[in-house]
Image (spheres, rainbow, N blue to C red):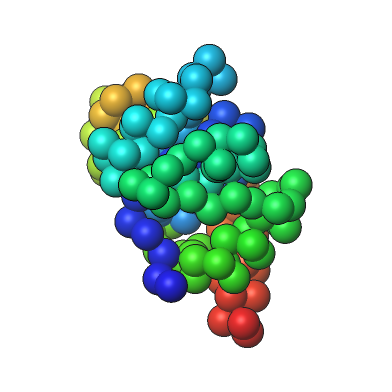
Amino acid sequence: MSAPRHLFCDAMLGGLARWLRAAGHDTALAPASAVDRDILGACRTEGRLLLTRDRHLAAHAGRDVRVLLLQHDGIEAQAAELTAALGIEWNLAPFSRCLLDNTPLHDATPAERAHVPERARDLPGPFRACPACGRVYWPGSHVRRMQRRLEQWQALAATR
């Protein structure tokens, strides 16, 4: 099965949602206060595949909501599970979506780049910004560490 285009993580999978967004996947995240009915309704309306560890939520999805009930705790195990079940591409479009709100990023304007810490302004880029929340992203050491992890997961996917 090829990876779906639109994913939805329940609130307990916030870390996984962040990594899927880092890889470039359109991944909605339920707020902690969301009730099952609202989560399922959003998945139905938006045509999203629900990722959850909540057996009760998965059992009430009905036929019109696709669900993947994850069996494992921890990001590494969940990444492997997603790769096996869906063929997730961990290098789809790295760092092209906001990690906080899932909005596609754009190249940062000079005004947006002014918000980058001074010591990072001379990095080669790219510098990207979220039009929704205003967060600016740059290729610091945290991005390099995340990129290595995404590459490791993609390499593991290639061996499956």
Could you tell whether 60 is left or right of 12 in the image? left
Could you tell whether 130 is left or right of 153 in the image? left
Could you tell whether 125 is left or right of 73 in the image? left
Q: Residue furthest top?
A: 33
Image quadrant where one finds the C terminus? bottom right
Q: Is residue 149 visible?
A: yes
Residue lying at 75% horizontally and 47% vertically, measured from the top left: 73
Could you tell whether 122 is left or right of 41 in the image? right
Q: What x and y, as percent, mark residue 4?
A: 37, 59
Residue lying at 70% horizontally and 53% vertically, measured from the top left: 71
Is the residue 93 above or below the residue 29 in the image? Answer: below
- Depth check: give the residue in front, 82 or 96: 82
Looking at the rendering, which quadrant does residue 150 occupy?
Answer: bottom right
Q: Is residue 14 visible?
A: no
Q: What x and y, as percent, mark residue 97?
A: 37, 44
- Depth check: give the residue in front, 156 or 10: 10
Looking at the rendering, which quadrant does residue 93 occupy?
Answer: bottom left
Residue lying at 56% horizontally and 41% vertically, measured from the top left: 59
Q: What x and y, as percent, mark residue 42?
A: 34, 32
- Depth check: give the residue in front, 84 or 93: 84
Q: Residue furthest bottom?
A: 159
Residue lying at 59% horizontally and 70% vertically, measured from the top left: 84
